[in-house]
Image (cartoon, rainbow, N blue to C red):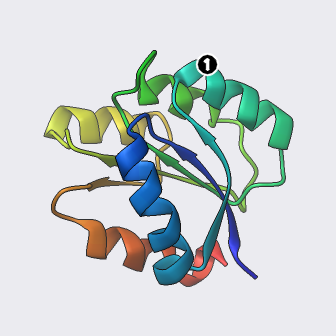
Amino acid sequence: MPLSTILVEDSRTIRENLIPALAELADAEVVATAETAGEAAVVLESLQDRWQLVVVDLFLREGSGLTVLRACQRRLAHQRVVVLTNYPTEEMRRRSLELGADAIFDKSRELDQFFEWCNFSELS
């Protein structure tokens, strides 16, 4: 059964490429998208326990992926949150993990590792 996934990404080009890649390489079905931290909060509230994975970019059209991570802190045990960003500095990695991200990947250099992580058995 595909992972019910929320994609928080403001770049249409990245969304258009990542959605089919997630389906093909990670058996993940994107059930909702958001371009801003506010939109992400609404989606998370509306889907509550009906998602398994959230993929978050740090820099959004409005707000920050860090805000989205805060909104995910009370998630259920089966729900995972991963940061996929072009800005994976040590500081951003540290802050993301402190806010509850399960992992953080550089979208320009670590896509293979990202998809491997998505396929990890604990997510299924």
- Please report the residue visible at 61 percent of the width from the left and 71 percent of the height from the top: 28
Could you say where residue 67 lies in the image, as x and y percent from the top left? 50, 22
Residue 72 appears left or right of 106 = right
Compared with 116, 76 (above or below) is: above
Q: Is residue 103 above or below residue 22?
A: above
Q: Count every numbered label the image shows and give the total.
A: 1
Quick one: 89 or 33, which is closer to the camera? 33
Q: Position of residue 62 (x, y in %)?
A: 45, 16
Residue at the image point whose x is 61% and y is 43% from the top: 33
Q: Look at the numbered disc 1 and give the secondary structure of its residue.
A: helix
Instruction: Decide if residue 114 is on the left or right side of residue 92.
Output: right
For label 1, count other residues whose C-alpha is less than 10 Å away and answer few (under 14), some (14-19) or many (20+). some
Task: Find residue 92 and report its image quarter.
Answer: top left
When the figure is inspected, residue 72 is found, relative to residue 117, above or below; the finding is: above
Q: Is residue 67 visible?
A: yes
Q: Nearer the viewer, residue 106 or 31?
A: 31
Residue 87 quadrant: top left
The image quadrant where one finds the N terminus is bottom right
- Between 116 and 22, the one lying in front of the other is 22
Q: Which residue is mark 1?
A: 38
Q: Quadrant of the C terminus?
A: bottom right
Residue at image coords 41%, 36%: 98
Q: Is residue 14 left or right of residue 62?
A: left
Relative image position of residue 59 (x, y in whole percent): 33, 28
Asked whether, in this view, residue 53 is left or right of residue 4, the answer is left
Q: Nearer the viewer, residue 109 or 92?
A: 109
Instruction: Inspect this view and state whether residue 83 appears.
Output: no
Measured along the vertical axis of the image, is residue 86 above or below residue 120? Answer: above
Tell me the amino acid under the disc marked 1. Gly
Residue found at x 62% / y 31%: 40
